[in-house]
Image (cartoon, rainbow, N blue to C red):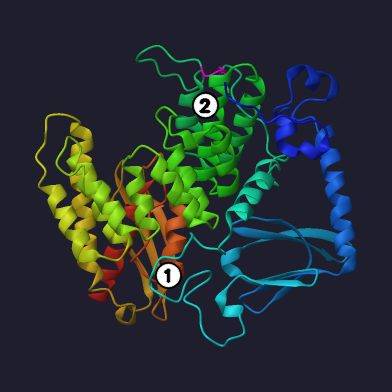
Amino acid sequence: MLSKVRGSGASDGFIGAIEMPAAKRRTRGEAWPNGRRLIAVAWAAVWALVLVAASAAQADVVELLSGAKVEGRIVARDAKSVSIETKIGDKLFTRTYPLERVAALTVGDRREVISAGASGSGEPADGPGRSKTNEPSNMGGGEARTKQQVEAMIAELGRTPPDWFESTALNYPKTLDLYWTSPPARVWDNQRYLGQYIWDVVNPNPSRWREGVKLMHHVLSLNQDRPEARRRTMDELGRMYFILLQDFGRAAFWWQQAQAQRGDLSGSDGGVHLAECYWRLGNKQMAVELLQKLPPNFSMIKLWADMGELDRALKLADANASGAYADVALLYAGDACRTCGKYAEALRYYQRAMQVPFSGRGKGRYERNMRRAAANAEAIKLYELLDLSKVPDGTYRASSVGYEAEVYVEVVVKEHRIVSVRVTDHREKQYYASMTEVPRRIVERQSVKGIDAVSGATLTSEAIVNATAKALAAAMKK
């Protein structure tokens, strides 16, 4: 039996509101997803008293890498950003800053350095939140945390609604079945079947991502007495927070509730993604311990490589390099080497992948993997030629093969620096955060090397990196 997180009263926060039994919801007001805000008001009142008391002492400060300082009251903080409420004139404004732009935070009399560039040592950092060595850091950016700190962060975020939750509409077709009814064979109706609605309507439309999360919270409230539907909804919440919103704390919370750590979620990589959440939140050891408990699968190869564990990644890939999915295993091995900067080894794996004969099964997958291996091999050959000091100012365009078709990018270079990378045209559907996250990483690193793919959108991510490399290489020839 799936254990439930129960609660009552304002102190139970987001989860107490969502999972309150139906009978209590009718007498005490509907849950968060249904729009009634009695519990929300009580919760906000508690936090208001706490924050007012804290702010009475002295203002919080967000110090930006630009040298600017913003004073006010820090109202939210997660692994990627910080929000501060500040008063301008007689009005309050809340500003959110990515941690990659933050030098330090001061709350009360405690100052926390976020970027090494703010340490006062006079030594330059390799970038916001980056190690000065070439080794992968212990996490995907941010500070190292103990297991207790990570678990506390997950619990706090999971029981608290995102700041956008109340202002997001609960919007879905009234014909939609909210109980995860399985469609008949060969029937596709994205206005009726929940999984198909998520795939066709929510995933490909960033403007619907928050609505999708709100819908899943609503679905959870409707399936109080359906354990399998509840578990599936929790898994989907984990996936949405993780892949769509890059909110690793809340993603981890929901996968924990779905018991993804057991590794038995049918058709889900939730366990592996939960391990990635631990790493992204600052504790690599938690990720390692979980991965060692889970049944092996291909998605682990990427995570091992992202965490700098190339030997483990290649061991898992090589174990499957001669079976029915040899093309997949060799591609993942190439990706692992590429992520860790081992470009000669990556090229050899991609070339081996292109030599795998067609086995008579999975023709579409096989052909797509052959195109992908060729595109990745071509990009790697360009890496050593790239020299931004030889790229004149200008706007350059190129394309590379994605999942559905070519992905086109536009790269702007000024004073031998990559100013921007923008996807100008594509036909991808399940691209998740890759369209914004991968260009951001390229600009941040000023390189196409060592850019890891966005989970769930590997082909699209690679297409953006490969197209950027082609655009810069062509610019050098002008």
- Confirm whether residue 178 shows in the render: no
Q: Which residue is mark 2?
A: 232
Residue 177 lies in magenta, yes or no? yes
Q: Position of residue 408 (x, y in %)?
A: 34, 54
Quadrant where the N terminus is found in the figure: top right
Q: Quadrant of the C terminus?
A: bottom left
Q: Amino acid at mark 2?
A: Arg
Q: Secondary structure at mark 2?
A: helix
264 or 107, nearer to the observer: 264
Q: In the rendered view, tell whether residue 72 sits above or below residue 2.
A: below
Who is closer to the viewer here, 379 or 223?
223
Residue drawn at x 61%, y 79% is 118
State whether the magenta stretch is mostly helix, strand or loop.
loop
As drawn, is 452 to the left or to the right of 173?
A: left
Using the image, determine if residue 153 lies above or below residue 24: below
User: Judging from the image, what secondary structure is the residue with disc 1 in?
Assistant: helix
Callout 2 environment at 10 Å: few (<14), some (14 to 19), or many (20+)?
A: some
Residue denoted by label 1: 445
Which stretch appears magenta? 176-180
* Mark 2 or mark 1, earlier in chain: 2
Type of residue at label 1? Arg
User: From this viewpoint, is residue 50 visible?
Assistant: yes
Image side of residue 149 versus residue 312, left or right: right
The location of residue 149, given as percent across then percent down, is 63, 55
Q: Is residue 443 left or right of residue 352?
A: right
